[in-house]
Image: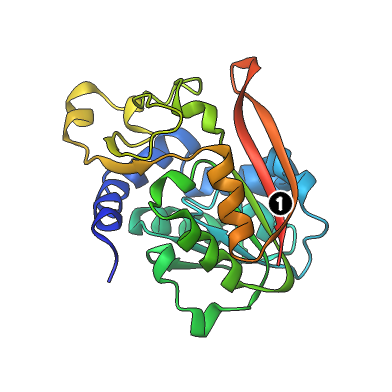
Amino acid sequence: MPKDYSLQNKKAWEYNAYEFWVRTCGTPAERAAQDRENPLGMLRRYAGYFDAYQGVRIANICGSCGKKAIPLALLGADVTIFDISEDNRRYATETARAANVPVRFEVCDVLEVDLEKYGGRFDVVFMEGGVLHYFHNLEEFMGVMYALLRPGGRMICSDFHPFTKISDILNLQQPAVGYFSTDVFEGEMAHARFFDDETRRRMPKCLYRKYTISEIINAITACGFQLKRFDEHPAWDNPNVPGEFTAVAVK
């Protein structure tokens, strides 16, 4: 059974998510047209972390609305999205259909992935856009990532920099905590700030746990990964401070 915090996060991610994607990304047909026009460009900086696309089996963890999975599929990858939200599945599958590419979508708690079916299946496990804070045991999470990969497979984990624990540098409007805090805290959905105040008050909250750099690196290596790169990226609106990071590790 999914954990209590996972059920709460699922409830939050199934509240107005489809409407949000239409408002910010366009209809599935409009988004698909953008993806088809320039799939490599839609990957942005993440393109630099892939050696190849054609035939590469990719697990897109918490792949949300398919914003990176569909460009990857257009480039020839065999992509499976694992995500907890039925609203996200609806938008992603409609967009993939409009783009005329096959993308599988498993609606599930990532920690409850069917490893008899998917264990050792993938060449690449890929995540981006703020994933780790939804999971409250990072070693358990990384253990699942390790299990999904074939021997020699790679994990590409891009996420919010731990600096965001102490400063809302990405303007996500989430509370700051102490850098070394291990507390779980309740916060708004990342996209809540795009809705009117009344809708925002009604939106379910998520339960977050944020990590330090050392916690992230230690969780990656503890389950057997070999860490190959750890890149820090500037904040979206301030090049002087870190906003995101990308870790690359090999099984």
Q: Residue at x 57, y 78 (%)?
A: 119
> In which quadrant will I find the N terminus?
bottom left
Q: Nearer the viewer, residue 210 or 239?
A: 210
* Residue in the picture at 41% in, 40% down: 22
Q: Quadrant of the C terminus?
A: bottom right
Secondary structure category for the residue under label 1: strand
Name the image quarter holding residue 58. bottom right
Where is 166 relative to 109, above or below?
above
Outermost residue, bottom side: 116
Is the residue marked by circle 1 packed among few (<14), some (14-19), or many (20+) residues within 10 Å? Answer: many
Q: Picture coordinates of residue 182 (x, y %)?
A: 37, 40
Q: Residue furthest right?
A: 51
User: From the viewer's perspective, is 249 left or right of 161?
Assistant: right
Residue nearest the viewer, comparing 250 with 191:
250
Numbered disc total: 1
Pick whichever, 121 or 29, lies toward us: 121
Please, is residue 220 above or below residue 204 in the view?
below
Residue 176 image point, x, y percent: 38, 24
- Place residue 246 in its image quadrant: top right
Q: Name the colouring of the figure.
A: rainbow
Task: Give the side of residue 229 with respect to residue 167, left or right.
Answer: right
Q: Position of residue 112 (x, y in %)?
A: 39, 70
On the picture, is 144 further left or further right than 154? left
Q: Is 231 placed above or below 95 here?
A: above
Image quarter of residue 203: top left
User: Which kind of residue does numbered mark 1 sit on?
Assistant: Val
Position of residue 218 measured from the top left corner of the image (x, y, whole percent): 59, 51
* Residue bearing mark 1: 248
What residue do we see at 47% from left, 40% from top?
A: 211
User: Which is nearer the eye, 140 or 56?
Assistant: 140
